[in-house]
Image (spheres, rainbow, N blue to C red):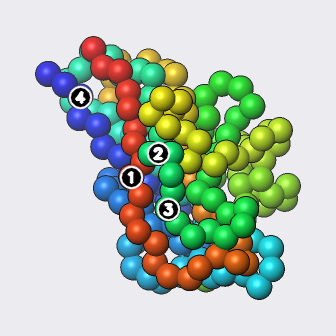
Amino acid sequence: MVATVNVQRITGPAGSKTYTNVTAVRLRTDDANTADATNPIPIPTSGYNYSYWASICLDISGTFTQISNIRHYSDGSIGWTFGTGGELRRGNRDSGDVGCPDASYQQASGTPGTTGYAIEDATNGHAYYKTQTTPTKNIANDTSSNPAVVDSSTYTAAGKTKHIVLQVKVASDATQGTQSAEVLTFIYDEI
């Protein structure tokens, strides 16, 4: 038998978070897991606006012996028009796994319809990442030949993995409009 592995988005407050199976994630300026055009990321007049961060984990179930070495990557070219300095990024740790443990989950926040808090914001950023020397990385640098190690744990029973935290950073010279879908990939070892 092989494991059943679902990609899940985590939303809501830490004490009552919700896990939802997803095949696509829309990054927006609220903590909703919907694919409509409500609360898009507006282009700022100066500086940057951010999506609320999105926490994405794997949910493992079924009959399996072991799952380990969970990694994540892009195709190396995110074709979105972020503007100068804009990017699709992920939370980063200076050493070890880049994935956030479930116990360190933090609900995304900001000003709905305007901007989310940057992961690295000293006051309102993500507590698991904001104190790191390099709190975020451009996900375009995570490729199949150099994937980010999300979770190096070994799973022998059903459960949820550490989660990757994604966010869009949009500059004042970005081009408006709905962006085309991008494929991001989780890989893991199973025996």
Q: Residues within 10 Å of mark 2 (few under 14, many from 20)?
A: many
Task: Give me the disc on residue 183.
Answer: 1
Which residue shows up at 33% across the image and 56% down it?
22
- The numbered dot on residue 136 is none
The foreground one among 188 and 112 is: 188
Q: CA distance from mark 4 to mark 3?
A: 33 Å
Q: Earlier in the sequence, mark 2 or mark 1?
A: 2
CA–CA distance between discs 2 and 1?
A: 7 Å
Residue at horizontal 38%, vertical 27%? Answer: 188
User: Helix, strand, or loop for circle 3?
Assistant: loop
Vertical order, 93 against 9 (above or below):
above
Real-space Cα separation, disc 1 to disc 3, in angstroms = 11 Å
Q: Residue furthest left?
A: 1
Residue 17 vertical position relative to residue 115 in the rendered view, above or below = above
Amino acid carrying mark 3 in the image:
Gly
Residue 52 against residue 78 in the figure, above or below = below
Can you tell which of label 3 and label 2 is closer to the viewer? 3
Q: Earlier in the sequence, mark 3 or mark 2?
A: 2
Q: Indicate the secondary structure of the residue bearing disc 1.
A: loop
* Cβ atoms under marks 2 and 1 closer than 8 Å: yes
Residue 118, image quadrant: bottom right
Q: Is residue 63 toward the left or the right of residue 60 in the image?
A: left
What residue did someone put label 3 on? 79
The one of 142 and 160 positioned closer to us in this rendering: 142
Which residue type does callout 2 highlight? Ser
Identify the mark nearer the N-term, 4 or 3: 4
Q: In front: mark 4 or mark 1?
A: 1
> Foreground mark, 2 or 4?
2
Instruction: Write down the residue under mark 2.
Output: 74
Residue 111 makes an appearance in the image = no
User: Label 4: which residue?
Assistant: 3
User: Which numbered mark, 1 or 3, is in the foreground of this view?
Assistant: 3
